[in-house]
Each structure stands twice: as structure tokens, then as C-alpha cells.
Amino acid sequence: MMVLPTEHFTATRLLSSAAALNFPFSDAVKYSILGLSVSLLLVALGILVWQAFRCFRSKRTTRTLHEAGHQQLANGELRYADDGSQASRQYKGIPTIKVEDFDVDVSSESSLGSSPPPADNKVNGWLHYSVYYDQQYRRLVVTVLEVEGLQQQNQISSLQLFVQIKLLWKGSDKRERCIDDRVEGTPPPLCKVLQEWRTRTVKGTCNPLFGDQFSCILQDEKALDHINLRMEVRDYDKYSRHTTLGDVRTSLEQFNISYPLELKGKLHTPRKDLVGEVLLSLKFLPISQRLEVGVLKVQTVQKELHLGAALYARVSVQCNSCKLKYQKTCAMECGALTVFNEVLVFHLPDFALQECKILVSVFETHSSRKPSKHLIGQLTVKKDKHSEDKHWSLMMFSAHQPIARWHDLLI
């Protein structure tokens, strides 16, 4: 390869210029800059390794808590695993847990307005949970730990267990009720669901471990004296027909929860709570096979009134295993006594009424909240082969005449 003289001269000149280039620093300054650069590189590598170690340890701790429901104490704070659901939140401002009366049965007495459980339906099992009220942040924290000793006849592999939690506000015992022919005496107090949560689902075990934590803000500490905690252990069903295996009830006024209190409650046969009353009228026209259901009044307990809150009732009728299309009343402004005075007409099938059931569901709607509606309670008036509701009997005895009676609204 031949190099031209002009190109050879240019390359020689550039090499001479590079050799003549010198930095205007002494050797000591050069070595100092080199040492500082190496030190910064080592510091950056150290930070990178530390962050990777923290990330790995955090993932391992979270996985262990989700699988074993284990609680860890670190730096004087109690940390819980969170399922990642929208309702559950991690709350780390909790001091060390203090265990008090761990093996005592803390379930409260049976709720008024609910039917007694059958004697042969025995429920086994215990629920471990903890409650804590942070006075500084005015926050109530409930943690579901585990369920143990649950005995089911079904196959264990088919179980999909979760815990449904409700905070019930117990209203005043002094309330008015319209005079009717029901039980005389002082009416039982009504309840209201303040908050409702559910844990994650654990499959294939009778002793599920959860470790899920939930919290809500209570501005007034005295409100704890009116709050009952109801926790139901349920078997999940994809069609929302969940089976309640047992429940545990706790009245917060009987405990000092200014520190985290870990409790163990025995599961009892599920019961419903009285959340309101509905004045219902029924009228049956046998010739035209028409049933008229009148929703007259709804009485509920109101802790506080919200702007945009309204109530409406949804009525569905099922006769001879034929479910008719449900109908809804208009939404009325929410109050302690909400007046509807609406009559819903249902055309029944043209054959004898062997079995019939009327289901009334009362919903509360909020224009400024999500979800915009939630169920307040339900009631059922039915006739079947084994029993017949008194209201249904009076309606059939007094055809063509509307018969009105008060019914308990349960949840």
C-alpha cells in the first residue's frame, strides 16, 4: 500500500502535537483526582449493593408474611403483611403488642332480632385477631391473624376461606316505634354498618393464616363504646353465594385498646344483626292473580347525616320456583324515618301458590362516594311447605284488603 507524501506529513504532525500536549497539573493533583474518582465509584457500588440487598430482604419478608401470617418486630414497630386489596392498608405506627386474655372467649351475646341457632349445627374453631386504637392519629386498626381448629365435613382441598369484617355502630336504646301487634315492651336497639372489609382468600386448608390489616379513622374516642366488631369466617363461592361457617363478635367498650391487644375468639353459629325496620303492606287479588307490595316506611339508625344520602328499596318475588322481575322504589332523602308510600304490583303465575317468597332489600346511595350504593339490610316474607309467615297468612285471609305490618331489617 502506497502512502502519499501529503498524508504522511499530516499524520506525523498530529502525533507530534499529541505528544507535546501536557496537563497543567502536578503529579500529586493527578493522583488525588484519580483516587477521588475511584472512591466515588466504590461508594456508588456500595449503595447499589445495599439497595439490592434491601429489595431482596423486603420481598422475602413479604412472601413469608403472606404465606405464614407471621408478625415481625423491627425497630420497635410491628409490621404486617398486606394483601394488596383496595380495602386493606398497612399501618406501621403500632407499638409492641401486649397479649391480654388471649384464650378467653370474647364473643358477645346473641343479637336481638335474630332467630336462635339450631342445636345440631355445632361450629368448631377459633379466630386470632388484634385490635388497636391510635389516640394520636385517631385511627382504629384491626388485624386478622389466623383461624385454627376449623372442622368441616367437606373436602379440605375445596375450601377457600376468607374473613368478612364489619364495624357495627350500636344506636341508642331509646327510639320510637309505631304501635302494632308485635312483641310488646322496649324495642331492641338498632345497628349501623360503619365499615366493611374482607381479607384475602386462602385455599385448601382448615387453618388459614392471614396477617391482613385494616384501619379507619374515628374522630371521637368515645365512639368506641358504641362499636361492635363482627368477623365472619366464610367459604368463597364464585357466584357470591358464600357460606358463613361461623362468626366472632366483640364489643370494644369492654377492652382497653390503647395498646395493641391480641385476642382469640371462639367461632359461633352465624347470626344476623338488627339494622332497621320496614313497614310493609301486602294485598293479594286472587281473581287477577296480582300481588301488591307496599313499601310504606323504613326506620334506620343514623350516626350522622350526609349530603346526597338517599334510601331506596328493591322488591323481588319468587313463586313456585319462578322468579319474577324485581322492582325498585324511588330514592328518598335519608333520615331516621324515611317515608316512601309506594306500591309495587306483581302479576303472579296462573296456578296455585304452593311456595312464595318476598325479598325486600334496602340500599343507601351516596352521590359523592364510591361505590355509590351499599346494602343496608334485607327482610323476607315467605310461605313454604313447612312454615308460613304470619303476615302472609293475614294477607291470604283478608283478600282484596291491604295488610300492613312492621318487619325487622337484618344484615
Image: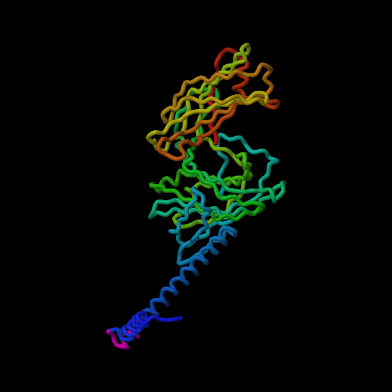
Q: Nearer the viewer, residue 329 or 298?
A: 329
Q: Nearer the viewer, residue 399 or 105?
A: 399
As drawn, is 31 to the left or to the right of 92? left
Q: Is residue 30 above or below residue 120?
A: below
Classified by dominant secondary structure, the portion drawn in magenta counts as helix
Q: Is residue 213 above or below residue 12?
A: above
Residue projecting furthest to the left: 24
Residue projecting furthest to the top: 287
- Which percent across, then down, holds residue 48? 45, 70
Q: Is residue 263 magenta?
A: no
Visible residue check, residue 388 = no
- Which percent across, then down, holds residue 112? 55, 36
User: In this picture, which residue range is highlighted in magenta?
Assistant: 24-33
**Residue at image x 67%, y 20%?**
353
- Which percent across, then down, holds residue 49? 47, 72
**Residue at image x 61%, y 12%?**
288
Q: Is residue 30 magenta?
A: yes
Q: Nearer the viewer, residue 41 or 127?
A: 41
Quadrant for residue 110, please give it.
top right
As drawn, is 192 to the left or to the right of 8? right
As drawn, is 28 to the left or to the right of 395? left
